[in-house]
Image (cartoon, helix red, strand yellow):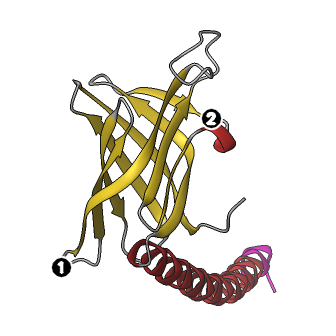
Amino acid sequence: MTAMKRYILSLFTILAAMAAISSCSTSKTDEERVLEYRVDSLAHVKADRALQNKHFVIMAERISLGRMGHMYNNPRRETNFVYVVDNDGVVQLAFDNGRIGLNGLGGVTVRGSVSKPRYKVDKKGNISYSYTIFGTGANAEVDIRLFAGSDDAQAYITSPYHSERMVIYGKVQPYNGN
């Protein structure tokens, strides 16, 4: 066998081995995708049920402020959240910016009664849940968008006193009281 034939045979052997490895890893990736889809679907069902039962929390993973969309990445989840339990709700934002805000944490807290809840599902399966919180001294409109097939959500928060909008990005979770 000539050197050229051995080289071509070796090249085909390597290509065949690579193709076999590639097909094995693809099937594993497909299995992982199916599992991920199922986990996300279950999370979406839990989040949807929490919204419908008015018993949920969205803890901020990111926050966007104002028209320019100033982004706060990795905010403290325990001080930046939206929650509703029955007809009571809270929107709290605390920016750890060294300034004392209205809530003593460098931000704003609106705590009060949830009014006018509206629940709607669009053709793609995205869920919109909107309500107004009437607190003492402050009100807020909250528009939550839960994305189809996952528990990922955006909560748009506006106040009747100014046109600036805040957006909390996080996951809708059933509220367990902690």
Q: Would you identify the image quadrant in which residue 12 lies?
A: bottom right
Point out the image quarter for the N terminus.
bottom right
Q: Amino acid at mark 1?
A: Lys
- For label 2, the residue is 75
Magenta span:
1-7
Say left or right for 56 vs 20.
Answer: left
Residue drawn at the location 36% of the way across and 29% of the way down: 137
Query: Main structural element of the magenta stretch: helix, strand or loop?
Result: helix
Q: Nearer the viewer, residue 76 or 14?
A: 76
- For label 1, the residue is 123
Point out the image quarter for the C terminus.
bottom right
Residue drawn at the location 69% of the way across and 82% of the way down: 25
* Vertical position of residue 135 compared to residue 55: above or below: above
Say left or right for 3 vs 144.
Answer: right
How far from the left and from the top, in percent, is residue 172?
51, 64
Magenta span has 2? yes
Marks 1 & 2, CB-CB < 8 Å contact? no
How many numbered callouts? Answer: 2
State the SS at label 1: loop
Residue drawn at the location 39% of the way across and 35% of the way down: 136
Magenta span has 123? no
Of mark 1 and mark 2, the one earlier in the sequence is: 2
* Vertical position of residue 35 compared to residue 109: above or below: below
